[in-house]
Amino acid sequence: MLRKSWFAAATVFLLAGSALAGTFGKVVSIGGHASDVALDEPRGVLYIANFTANRIEIMSLQSNTIQTSLNVAAQPSAVSVSPDGHWLLVAHYGNNAAPASPTNGLTLIDLRNNYAKQVFVLPDPPMGLAFGANNRALVVTTKNFLIFDPAGSISVLTSIAAQAAKSLPVPAQNFPPNIVAASVASSPDGQFIWGFGDTLEFRYTVSTGALDSSMYTSSPAMAPRTVSVSADGSFATLGWTLKDSNLYNLAQFPNAGGTLNIGTTQIDSSRHLIYSQMSPASASSVPPPVLQINDDDNLTVRESLSLPENTAGKSTLKRDGSIMYAVSDSGVLVLPVGSLNQWPRLAASVEDLVFRGNFCDRTVGTQTFVVTDPGGAALVLFQAR
């Protein structure tokens, strides 16, 4: 199997009439490091937690520009919108060292009342949160699972056997996923909430209050530090793993490097796809950022798209699957994944070419393959020797 031969032949033809591949998507810079995003489609906005600037940026979905910003307490690390559209809940990660920082807490923002804010101090650092279909939020701290009711009550669901986050201080130049060592996300219907930290992974059923969890060890680190949940909550991506409802591995993204602040995953159940970027396994040669399109059952790679910069944690998808919004190095990447056919791409008719040698036949072996634009714009024939 001479994979290099046909790549070399293809290169000769392509260099004669084309330039380097373009990138897919648009970067929206926020002047800080984003740590989480929450989609509010009825209002046509995306809420972005600006971890270093202590703000919630509000981005217009129509213009992909920042409309306004809300000043909040220090280090907003996670955000979630209630299903009824009334509340935006923000987690603030202070520190995990004794004595606990008074900046560990929650900010509840009233989206129907001119962004009025209420602040709730927590005894332990919140690592992640997500609203369920009942308009109550599951909040995960370093010690407890909490249920937060926007009416103002906080109750303990259960405790965590061991701390799931690394202790600060952490060098200030670290990105938010390196500091806030957990991620939490709900299924699109709000019936299930999944999450994981450094040593703990869990699945919470909103209707019954049942919490299934397990401790784990991982090498490399379970990265990227992000969660994406299928439409029915039956499976999810946790870092570089694909898990079923029993928290068993269904598949693993290959050659993951374990860098917490590089990459993302996002399940598109309507198309049975997963959009993903993984950090490279080798630190000696860092490739340009690439978004892969995988099958959602076995992670088979269908396409690879060059990105303008690395994704860097949480992402979210519009309900119609048209646009994906991902935390990135300088803010947020806007990725129109639902209209890929409007972007010029290349796809080969075969993945590999096999040449079988014959001592009696000294003629040059040739095989033909076709390179097409999946959107239907072009078709080119190549011959490999």
Image: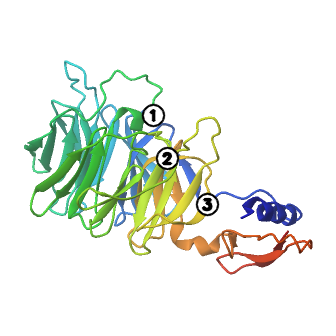
Q: Residue at x 45, y 29 (%)?
A: 174
Q: Residue at x 75, y 62 (%)?
A: 2
Tag 1 residue:
175
If you read the primary sequence from the N terminus, does the residue marked by circle 2 or circle 1 appear first?
Answer: 1
Tag 2 residue:
256
Which secondary structure lies at badge 2? loop
Label 1 vs label 3: CA separation? 24 Å
Which secondary structure lies at badge 3? strand
Position in image of residue 145 (x %, y %): 15, 43
Q: Is residue 312 left or right of residue 374?
A: left
Which secondary structure lies at badge 1? loop
The one nearer the camera, 94 or 383, is 383
| Visible residue check, residue 88 | no
Instruction: Check disc 1 and give the amino acid type.
Output: Phe
Front of the two marks 2 and 1: 2
Label 2 vs label 1: CA separation? 19 Å
Instruction: Check disc 3 and give the amino acid type.
Output: Leu
If you read the primary sequence from the N terminus, does the residue marked by circle 1 or circle 3 appear first?
Answer: 1
Tag 3 residue:
305
Front of the two marks 3 and 2: 2
- In the image, residue 369 sits, relative to residue 82, either above or below, namely below
Question: Quick one: label 3, few (<14), some, or many (20+) residues within 10 Å?
Answer: some
